[in-house]
Amino acid sequence: MTFRIATCVPRLQSPLLGKAWRRRTCGHSRFPVATIFQQTKCIHSTCHMAEGQRYRRLRLGLEDDLENAFQTLLLFIKNPALAGQLRHLEVHGSRYTAYGRDLDFNIPPEEPQQLWLDDLDRLKMAINKAGFTEGNEPQRLLHILLQNPTGRDLRTSCHLGHMAFKQAVAALLIAISPHLESLAVFHVGEPSSNIEDFALLSLLRRANTARGAITYLQNLKNIIFLPDDYSAGNDGFYYNISEDYHARLNLVRRLPALESVSFMLASWNNEAGRPPPPKSANYNDISFALRKFTYTVGGRAQPEGGKFSIDLSSIVKSLWRHRHTLEELDLDVEDNVSWGEIYGEDGLKSSEQIYADEDPVYEQLWEGEMDELDGLEMPPSDISLADFPKLKCLGLGVHTLCFLARGIGPNRLGAESISLADRLPRSLQSIRLYGKGEAGDSTLDCGTHQPDLDVDVLLEKLVAEKGERLPGLVTIEGFDPVILRAKEVPEHAYLDGDHPFLWKQPE
């Protein structure tokens, strides 16, 4: 499995169905006044393309075009072969709701959109096949979907009706698309959220916990958690939204084909010090293994100014349990690592056990698996890159590379004893160096912790010795040209209106 905390997202495009529909009225329908859409000759012929490539990628919610999203859903329900083409779905939005909190979806909307009776029947069948069959679930979900997507309320992104409608459309699209491989989705709800209103949240929970004949999300390989849109906490310069990573991991961690989990514009949260159980996966049926871990900084400025310090030792200690499967490690975080850790006493601390069972919320998230923690290996007091025998690709800052090769813990090697060629795993095939030749950042440099290593000499020695001691290491990038390390967006960039370090949603 790949775990990534990054600041980029794949560009998934909608087929832009809006221009391919024309409007008709349905006078004979028993459902109140109607807006109905029918395929034009152009789109009809497209639906029967032999290549089957038209609907492989779909993006919803970026421009609040809920009407087109709903018509896409109806088209897929009517033509299952089209739903079978979908491989990538991207759903944008925000968890924030300021209006419509008193909506009652147990009753029909006051001004519903109208459908042909055939479309209505197919929609009901899709709701049933998606598993929304308990109690009043089918009726509530139908009422949500019968809201008028062109109405004022649903054009307001922070309205509960908008959120519920978008989640319902996305949930049914997922449920009828058995070959979906990649899902990019905004934060669809908290652990305490009312799943009656949030169909996508409910669908993910069911797929993750079901032990029966679930047909959807069985081929999902990649999940990307997108940042919140349309939120005061995400104004394009700052990203000041508290994230609950464990809750989102808990929505997908048991999916049988899952290979990669990514968080975009991840913000700091103290729960990072309380890791999930190391075997958080559906290990009754399949064994998940962490193969790749990527973490980079930047993308937004810190709301309080300055920058936060990353505890590199804690990250590596958490990865230690995956040492026999981890093949790729990319940590572009050196600009946020304190030299007090790299060259001072902070890097000499022993591993400490985290008593997670003192947190009742944590216990609830990992219910049924907490007792397995007792039998797991605890990290040793000293850890280095040499403990990761499967590593093939490394991406690290130059000081970080020397620090992790030297070792974390009370018995780390003295400066005179270090040879990178002796302290790196023999499985290595490539190294990507960040920031070689760049000046250090005085914000995090502690005056009493000056480097006791000459990283340039160590790297030159590595190049000279790698042929004999690391025969598999064929590529070392970052000497010429230099690869600049990732950096926080500076405060003064707010005055510029634009800055190369700012992350932007791809168009």
Image: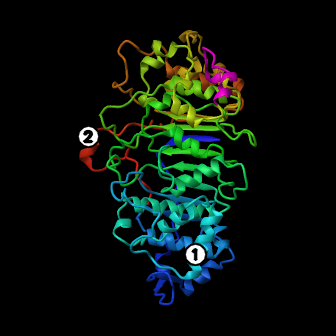
Question: What amino acid is at disc 1?
Answer: Leu
Q: Secondary structure at mark 1?
A: helix
Q: Nearer the viewer, residue 320 or 400?
A: 320
The answer to whether residue 92 is magenta is: no
Q: Nearer the viewer, residue 453 or 337?
A: 337
Q: Nearer the viewer, residue 151 or 105?
A: 105
Q: Nearer the viewer, residue 351 or 138?
A: 138
The residue carrying pointer 2 sits among few (fewer than 14), some (14 to 19) or many (20 or more) residues within 10 Å by Cα, namely: few
Please count the marks in the image. Answer: 2
- Indicate which label's residue lies in the foreground, 1 or 2: 1
**Relative vertical location of residue 185 with respect to residue 316 in this rendering, above or below:** below
Residue farthest along the right direction in this orientation: 285
Q: Which residue is at 55% across, 38% downward?
A: 294
Give the residues in magenta. Answer: 370-386
Q: Which residue is at 57% across, 37% downward?
A: 365
Residue 492: assigned label? 2
| Dot 1 or dot 2, earlier in sequence | 1
**Relative vertical location of residue 73 with respect to residue 431 in this rendering, above or below:** below
Q: Label 1, on which residue?
A: 75
**Left or right: 370 as drawn, with respect to 304:** right
Gap in Å between the C-alphas at discs 1 and 2? 49 Å
